[in-house]
Image: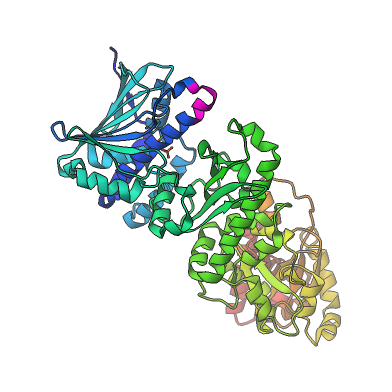
Amino acid sequence: MTTETREFQAETRQVLRLVIHSLYSHKEIFLRELISNASDACEKLRFEALSRPELLGGDTLGVELVPDAGAGTLTVKDNGVGMSREEVIENLGTIARSGTRKFLEALSGDSARDAQLIGQFGVGFYSAFIVADRVTVLTKRTDSEGVCWESDGEGAYDIQPHHKADRGTEVILHLRDEDKEFLARERLEHLVRKYSDHLSVPIVLRHDGKEETLNQAKAFWTRPKQELKDEDYQAFYKHLTHDWDDALAWAHHKVEGNLEYTSLLYLPKRAPFDLFDRDQKHGVKLYVKRVFIMDKAAELLPPWLRFVRGLVDSQDLPLNVSRELLQNNRTVEKIKSALVKRALDLLEDLATGKPEAYAEFWNAFGVVLKEGLIDEDAPHERIARLLRFRSTASEGDAAGVSLADYVARMKPEQKAIYFLTGDTLAAARNSPHLEGFRARGFEVLLLTDRVDEWVTNHLREFEGKKIENVARAAADVESAIETPDKAAADSAYKDTLERLGKVLAGKIESARLSGRLTESSACLVAGEHGISLRMARMLKQAGQNNPFPMLPILELNPRHPLVERLKDATGDEAFADLAHLLHDQAVLAEGGQLDDPASFVKQVNKLILEGLSSKPKILLG
Ligand code: ADP
């Protein structure tokens, strides 16, 4: 028979090495992962047998553990679906997930940080190489020929046909000398009880000619809640998700009546690396009457809850439900809206009961939850209450500020909820737009996610208070920062402002004085109705059309010496130099890019030299 040797896909090798390395102190999890795969294979067979009962015949689906001290091997065996040759190559030869390369590039070489990151990968089958220096997989699907796959996990694997008689898979681990402990009956029994007790298929240990069923073999979610301990939920979570970490929180519900289902929803602690990969499916597992139907049933939760893991077991859906059927099904719609409520309940409980854990959730997934505000069908009011922000009043507050916190400490004279968006927290905190608000003691929320530009377009009010961008020329913003000497200053600057409008034509809509600024000379603000300047910039960077092309307004601080100089400048060239300089500074402070950076540098240098010379008035003509 022909043996073919194939290389692992390049990324697979790299991930493999990292996984083995970082899991060295948790070797035992290989057993959980392999049993988990074997049990999934049995569930898949049960599903296929719905339409082809002959597949199952009289078989009892299950997993067997066979330690062989003589050969030094541990075998994990199942009579599930098995794999065809193509499936073996696809499943065991690649980590066929888009984004893997990008993920690997993100690794820093700092092993502590990388170990955290690598945890975002499900380890799965590859964990076999933690304890085995060689792994042999014998597998057979019902209608195809058997296959033997073998590898030392270094760089290549061998694959050849194999006369395997029965359907299913055997994973044979050739244990390293130092890992022979995994041949001991007590050790295996203990590990199965610890990690795999909740699986619905029987796990049988074959030892000294005896057979011993190690688990309860009852679907975990069907067991009464009061019987289940936190450790049980955590163990089941790891089986479901292949996550190395514990779950952050969960909610387990059995619902009877019109709609009958059991749901078990988990919040992970960390975001998977492909959370923002549009091609990647996310979602909970779907069971119908305890039979596994599909992984990642995206139809059961909206995209803004795609971080939720877990399962739903419905009594009402037909067993032959397909993806197509899920898309236009009233029962699915009802389950979906029930799950949205359950997920939001879970988040609200966490936010009130365990603010620190909620902060952890928020840091990992807040940016996804926010997308719900853009979804027309989502409960915006509930989502708005779950939002957390940085703000000018919360320097090191890890938990973040909620809109309710903000409203509770608003100044009596304050009319609206104020926010500012920026590319980084530092840029936002130092933005000239904040100065007037800071001077009046008004708190401003600081938003730095890209999605915030869209979110704030949709989130216009909270508890009857308007939500306003401080970098926009809106009435509630203007009135908040009006200065008492405004009228006098306006008339003193009338000519200067008109002149500015002409000199900067094409760059600004108009120029005016503002109470926004207390320290800086100038800033740009967006008109009341256009999109924000940051959003316009983001669209431009993405090569997209701006649907509302509008020029910004240049605002000046009449108390700033440079602005006073501008007023006193008589020569046209001096006026224009200073006007461009003020404008360009405002662009930079706002996070924008200059059309002509070299001229800006020249003008700054000219001004510095003037300042250094003894006759500064020359510049001003
Ligand atoms: P995951 O289970 O997260 O997809 P794994 O690396 O554990 O990742 O496994 C990759 C794939 O290999 C599985 O999705 C499954 O299709 C297949 N596989 C693994 N073990 C078995 C098995 N015992 N029987 C059938 N298929 C299996």
Q: Is residue 315 above or below residue 499?
A: above
Taking the spot 64% from the left edge, 52% from the top edge, the residue there is: 338
Side of 9 relative to 581 (left or right)? left
Q: Could you say where residue 230 lies in the image, as x and y percent from the top left? A: 41, 59
Q: Could you say where residue 569 lies in the image, as x and y percent from the top left? A: 76, 77
Side of 268 relative to 113 (left or right)? right
| Quadrant in which ligand 1 is drawn | top left
Q: Could you say where residue 254 lies in the image, as x and y percent from the top left? A: 56, 52
Task: Say which quarter of the image contains residue 76.
Answer: top left
**Residue stretch rendered in magenta on the structure:** 47-53
Q: Could you say where residue 3 lies in the image, as x and y percent from the top left? A: 29, 17
Taking the spot 49% from the left edge, 53% from the top edge, the residue there is: 271
Query: Looking at this view, is 403 or 252 the one in front?
Result: 252
Quadrant the N terminus occupies: top left
Task: Say which quarter of the image contains residue 316.
Answer: top right
Taking the spot 68% from the left edge, 72% from the top edge, the residue there is: 433
